[in-house]
Amino acid sequence: GPGGCGRDGFHSPPFCREACRGGDGGGGGVDLSGPPEPLGPEEEPWEVLVVGGPAKPSTPLETLARSAMASGQMASAEASEATAVATEIAAQRAAEAAEDAATGAEDANIDASRASKLLGEARLQEKSSLANALGEEQSTSAALGKSRMYVANLDTVAYSALAKSGLEDELLPIYKGLQEWKMNMLHPPVIEGRKASVQAARPFEEQLEKIETEVGAYQQQAVMLSGQARTMRTEAVDLANFAVKQQAEGQLLGARDDMMRAHQMMTHAQMIESQAHDIQKAAQELNLKVPLYVVAAQNAAQEAMHRYNPDRFAPPPLGRGPFLRPPPVGAAAR
């Protein structure tokens, strides 16, 4: 068409310029990477020739569609370029990571070599230590055996040396004195003697307490019976006097009965008085044993103190008669 390349009627002036820029109409293809160039001031829009119909001019919608298609192709090209750049960056990072991993593996290999070397040295040292320990054990066992033999024969050797030196005769008095001093310090003779005297006199003192308790009980019972007899005797006398008065008044039967009751009361009072005398006599007999147990307790205490410390305490006095033999205690005293 007019202003075109003259090849056919399908090239518009803008595209014809780009497509046929190579010379005589046989140049390179159309560059659709950018938007179409606007029409020049002297250029007119070409009509689109449709085969089999009349040519129509390009509408604004068609022009806009062409521009959108060109923009899409440009965006696709930029996206492909961005994808290529991203792929290149990812490859670069993977290469760096691989390089770091290789460096780490090399360091690990070096550390492993060092550890293997140290392990070998430790095994050698362990074997050397084990050999030294076995040697020390054998030496210790031999020394222990010698020590046991020496200890087993030590008593014999010491006794033989002591017998030859005569030291036992010299140390024996010292040892005895030491034992006596030890006993005096741990168990003072005075204190131990007093303890023993208390224990020796305790049976006699306990029996003495029983006797004194029984004597007291007998005396109280005798006093009570004597009081009852005295009261009954007084009542009998009063009743007899009343009977005499009744007899003087002529009440013979009543006087006779009261007189008989008075005689019965007097008889009963005499019986109670007799029981009181018997109890009092038993109390006196028990009371006679009190000095025996008192002396026996004193003798037992004195004998115990003299036995523990004869230098400070005299032996018990000797005598004849009932005070020489100690009285019975416990069940034997009943």
Image: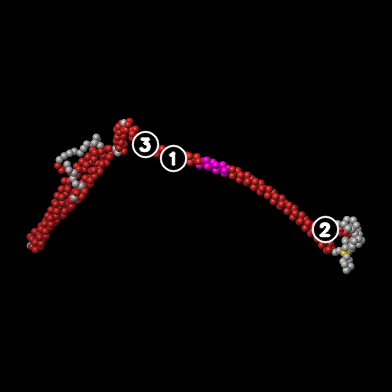
Colour theme: secondary structure
Q: What crowding class fits label 2: few (fewer than 14 Cα within 10 Å), some (14-19), or many (20 or more)? A: some
Circle 1 residue: 141
Circle 2 residue: 32
Q: Up-down: is 170 above or below 84?
A: above
Q: Up-down: is 280 above or below 310?
A: below
Seen in the image, is 19 located left or right of residue 211? right
The magenta span reads 118-130
Which of the two labelled residues, at mark 1 and mark 2, occupies the earlier sequence position? 2
Q: Amino acid at mark 3?
A: Leu
Circle 3 residue: 154
Are circles 1 and 3 on residues that touch, CB within 8 Å?
no
Which of the two labelled residues, at mark 1 and mark 3, occupies the earlier sequence position? 1
Q: Up-down: is 260 above or below 160?
A: below
Q: Residue at x 7, y 60 (%)?
A: 248
Seen in the image, is 15 located left or right of residue 191? right
Q: Residue at x 21, y 43 (%)?
A: 297
Q: Nearer the viewer, mark 1 or mark 2?
A: 1
**Percent of width and height locating residue 295:** 19, 42
**Residue 124 visible somewhere in the drawing:** yes
**Percent of width and height locating residue 246:** 9, 61
SS for callout 2 = loop
Q: Amino acid at mark 2?
A: Leu
SS for callout 1 = helix
Seen in the image, is 39 located left or right of residue 181? right
Q: How many marks?
A: 3
Q: Residue at x 12, y 57 (%)?
A: 268
Front residue of 240 and 214: 214
